[in-house]
Amino acid sequence: MDKDSLIFLTGAVWNWAVAVSLFVLSVATPSAFLDLGMEIPNAMVWFHCTVGFVGVFGVAYFIAYKDLSARRGMALLGVVEKLFIFVVLFVYFLLEEVGVVGFGLIAVDLVYGMLFLWTLLHERHP
């Protein structure tokens, strides 16, 4: 398996793991938000929509893993999505609304944002 394929496959698995874990935790143990240094949301609808979109991005990364023609567009979206999530949550970390554990989890998004950028910068042109 080439490096780009591995980046997209592990990116898909990471997004699915985050989406499923956060959804299950929010339903089964809402107090888990406190362990992440966050307040428990008043209404879970927006949180569940957000983790749903995280899972959908996982599907898109998986499609890019299987379909070479989808990689450039998904790498570009991956850079934007991962860096956006990192910046937003980093600001909330600085505002002390996201704890150290939550910040550690979003650091993975920064890594994937850089990996997707790497795939764009090193893509082969015919």
Image (cartoon, rainbow, N blue to C red):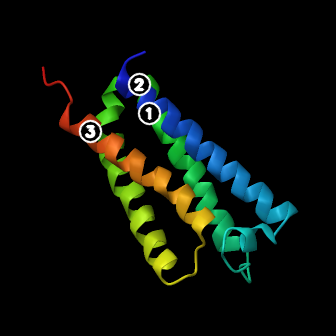
Q: Is residue 36 above or below residue 56?
A: below
Question: Disc 2 vs disc 3: Cβ atoms closer than 8 Å?
Answer: no
Q: Is residue 52 above or below residue 88?
A: above
- Along the viewing direction, whichever of 107 and 25 lies nearer the viewer: 107
Q: Quadrant of residue 75?
A: top left
> Badge 1, how many Cα within 10 Å: few under 14, some, many 20+?
many
Task: Give the residue type at disc 1.
Answer: Phe
Question: Disc 2 vs disc 1: Cβ atoms closer than 8 Å?
Answer: yes
- Along the viewing direction, whichever of 61 and 119 lies nearer the viewer: 119
Residue at 70% over, 72% down: 45
Q: Name the residue beneath numbered marker 1.
A: 8
> Badge 3, how many Cα within 10 Å: few under 14, some, many 20+?
some
Q: Which numbered disc, 3 or 1, marks the residue that appears first in the sequence?
A: 1
Q: Quadrant of residue 112?
A: top left
Residue at 64% over, 72% down: 46
Quadrant in the picture for the C terminus: top left
Q: Name the residue beneath numbered marker 2.
A: 5
Q: Please identify the residue farthest to the right as the structure is shown.
A: 28
Disc sitting over residue 118 in the figure: 3
* Distance (Cα) linking label 3 and label 1: 12 Å
Q: Please identify the residue farthest to the front as the structure is shown.
A: 100
Residue at 31% over, 28% down: 69
Q: Which numbered disc, 2 or 3, marks the residue that appears first in the sequence?
A: 2
Count of numbered circles on the image: 3
Q: In front of the other: label 3 or label 1?
A: 3
* Distance (Cα) linking label 2 and label 3: 13 Å
Where residue 56 appears, as percent x and y from the top left, is 56, 48
Residue at 43% over, 77% down: 91
Q: Please identify the residue farthest to the top as the structure is shown.
A: 1
**Tag 3 secondary structure:** helix
Where residue 35 appears, as percent x and y from the top left, is 73, 69
Task: Give the residue type at disc 2.
Answer: Ser
